[in-house]
Amino acid sequence: MMGPGIAQIFAAHGHPVQVHDTAGERLATVEERVRANLERLAEYDLADADGIPETLGRISVTQNLEEACAGAGVVVEAITEDLKLKQDLFAELDRLCPPETILCSNTSVMSITEIGSRAKRRERILGTHYYQPPFLVPLVEVVQTQYTAPECMDKIYAMLCAVGKVPVRVLKDVPGFIANRMQHALWREAFALIDEGVCDPETIDIAVKNSFGLRLPVLGPVMAADMVGLDLTLAIHDYVLKHLNASPTPSSTLREHVAKGEFGFKTGRGFLKWDEESIRAAREQLTTYLLETLSRRRAQGNTADHKSEGKQS
């Protein structure tokens, strides 16, 4: 899901990229997928249509990990979320890559420290968590461990800025990092409201998309609290926090759906019902929204909210 999109980001900004996968059939789709992404970006003047062949020419594919690592300045791991597989891979990357190569994991929730625990050069290992689709969502969480060298963090941060991403520094290696911790806290409360019969699943999404969700692109939670007033925020929290869900275990309704084999898009049923047309429409709506948002930001000369490096520390 993530590899070709991440490769595209760097190839589009002049970097030669090797894409490695053990499965040849997946590698065979890389060029087609990247081309389709670039053509869609070009429709919104977010990519140069004439430059697509040149970008594709910078991407090569290989099933040989040693070949992929040879001479690499940066490696981004984007394999399945399996801790042992990631540990095995990073031990191998540590062995195969030149000493100066920086090794990054795209895990969305796992401890970077644990992932790199079997490597000898742990100072060059860090997290770079991209959001799906990575070529459209600006944020990249750059995660340091207690072993990560500051110069590696600085180099990756600067490199991501140079290719148009919005990196943020995660100063402690905590599970879920920043954005996913907040996202899954919201999901936990949403699913708890369904468990408790407060509302049905459709109502959850209607409520979010037509209230605070509408404001989120310009009004994050910290700014919103300041706007409301911290005195009022404190008064609200004193009353409501004890009523919010704080369960350390997943939603019972979520477990029931999974037990029934109802996985969402994959199976045509999850919390909601899906068919091919509604799935296609949902994906298209998301992609179009992201493209229009990025196009509007570019026209306004404001790609995103960047935080100055002076305040990052």
Image: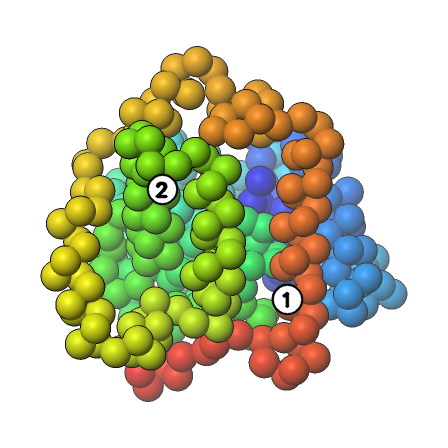
Q: Secondary structure at mark 1?
A: helix
107 lies above or below 234: above
Mark 2 sits on what residue? 190
Mark 1 or 2: in front is: 2
Q: At 70% from the left edge and 79% from the top edge, which residue is drawn?
A: 299
Tell me residue 169's x, y (percent).
34, 67
Tell me if mark 2 has few (under 14), some (14-19) or many (20+) residues whose alpha carbon lies within 10 angstroms of its own.
Answer: many
What is the residue that sits farthest to the right in this orientation? 50
CA–CA distance in space, label 1 to label 2? 26 Å
Q: At 47% from the left edge and 41% from the top edge, which residue is drawn?
A: 203
Q: In the shown orientation, is residue 79 left or right of residue 174?
A: right
279 lies above or below 122: above
Q: At 62% from the left edge and 27% from the top edge, which residue is drawn?
A: 274
Q: At 51% from the left edge and 56% from the top edge, which residue is drawn?
A: 210
Q: Which mark is residue 293?
A: 1
Question: What's the residue type where badge 1 is placed?
Answer: Thr
Q: Earlier in the sequence, mark 1 or mark 2?
A: 2
Tell me residue 246's x, y (percent).
19, 42
The answer to whether one can see residue 73 in this image is: no
Q: Quadrant of residue 220?
A: bottom left
Q: Quadrant of the C terminus?
A: bottom left
Circle count: 2
Question: What's the residue type where badge 2 is placed?
Answer: Ala
Between 300 and 257, the residue placed more toward the observer is: 257
